[in-house]
Amino acid sequence: MFKHLLFGIVLFFSCAFSSACHAQTTEPTATTSGKYRYLLLSKTGTISRFRIQMGESITFKRFQDKKLQTRVVLDIRGNSFFVEGLEVPLKDVEKIRLRNHTGGRKVASFAGAFLKTAGVVFTTVGVINTLTNLKAKDKLDREDGLQTTAAALALYGIGEGLHVLRKGTYKINQKWTLKVIEMY
């Protein structure tokens, strides 16, 4: 009797959960042929390589465009990638811009944001200190407020300068190449 009950419980659970088991279902793939494709931006003669995969946003400039545009990569086929109703052949791409892909750029981004925030806070403090002591010409607080404001504006400027370093623009030429990589 116990064997039949145990067999029934095992049979019930195996039937109930076999259709919901994640190992039994197939995952949807972006490509129908079983290939995994991505764009590879690489520097010739070095190990500097950056992957751009389907679903990621890409900032690029074609030769006929006037400015950079940011779009989401929808598909990668042959020697081109597809973004929102546009096929972009790799031979037409002039520049690629990437952000925060190296440790130095991440530090520059964090330090820039920190210095800009400190600049805004101390500029506000310096301006309030200067404005509240406008009537008292002989008070030292007014001079301290002007110095605080000047130093804070310098911090903000340095932070803005570091934010310029957070993005790297790579011109596609003999030094940097952009190609489609297929993995099976």
Image (cartoon, rainbow, N blue to C red):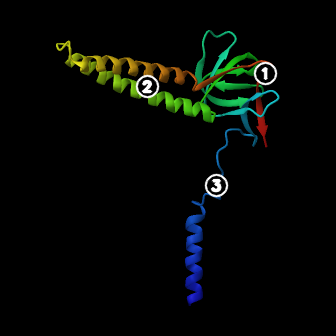
What's the distance in space between the residues labelled 2 and 3, CA to CA? 50 Å
- Is residue 102 toward the left or the right of residue 136 in the image? right
* Crowd band around label 2 with a 10 angstrom C-alpha radius: few (<14), some (14–19), many (20+): many
Please count the marks in the image: 3
Crowd band around label 1 with a 10 angstrom C-alpha radius: few (<14), some (14–19), many (20+): few
Task: Name the residue rendered at 20%, 14% in the picture.
Answer: 138
Q: Nearer the viewer, residue 85 or 47?
A: 47
**Are the residues at dot 1 and dot 3 in contact (C-beta closer than 8 Å)?**
no
Rendering quarter of residue 42 = top right
Instruction: Classify residue 85 as left or right of residue 49.
Output: left
In depth, the one of 171 and 116 nearer the eye is 116
Which quarter of the picture shows residue 61?
top right
The residue that mark 1 highlights is 175
- Reply above or below: 142 against 181: above
What amino acid type is highlighted by mark number 2? Lys
* Image coordinates for residue 23, horizontal then vertical, percent: 64, 58
What element does badge 1 sit on?
loop
For marks 1 and 3, give the one nearer the viewer. 1
Question: Crowding at label 3, few (<14), some or many (≥20) Cα neighbours within 10 Å?
Answer: few
Depth-wise, is mark 2 or mark 1 nearer the camera? 2
Rendered residue at 17%/14% (across/down):
136
Can residue 56 be seen by looking at this rendering? no
Disc 2 and disc 3 in contact, CB within 8 angstroms:
no
Q: Quick check: 53 above or below 97?
A: below
Which residue is tagged 2? 116
Q: Secondary structure at mark 2?
A: helix
Residue 43 seen in the current view: yes
Give the amino acid type for the residue marked by disc 3 in the picture. Thr
Identify the element where label 3 is drawn.
Answer: loop
Tell me which numbered mark, 1 or 3, is placed earlier along the sequence.
3
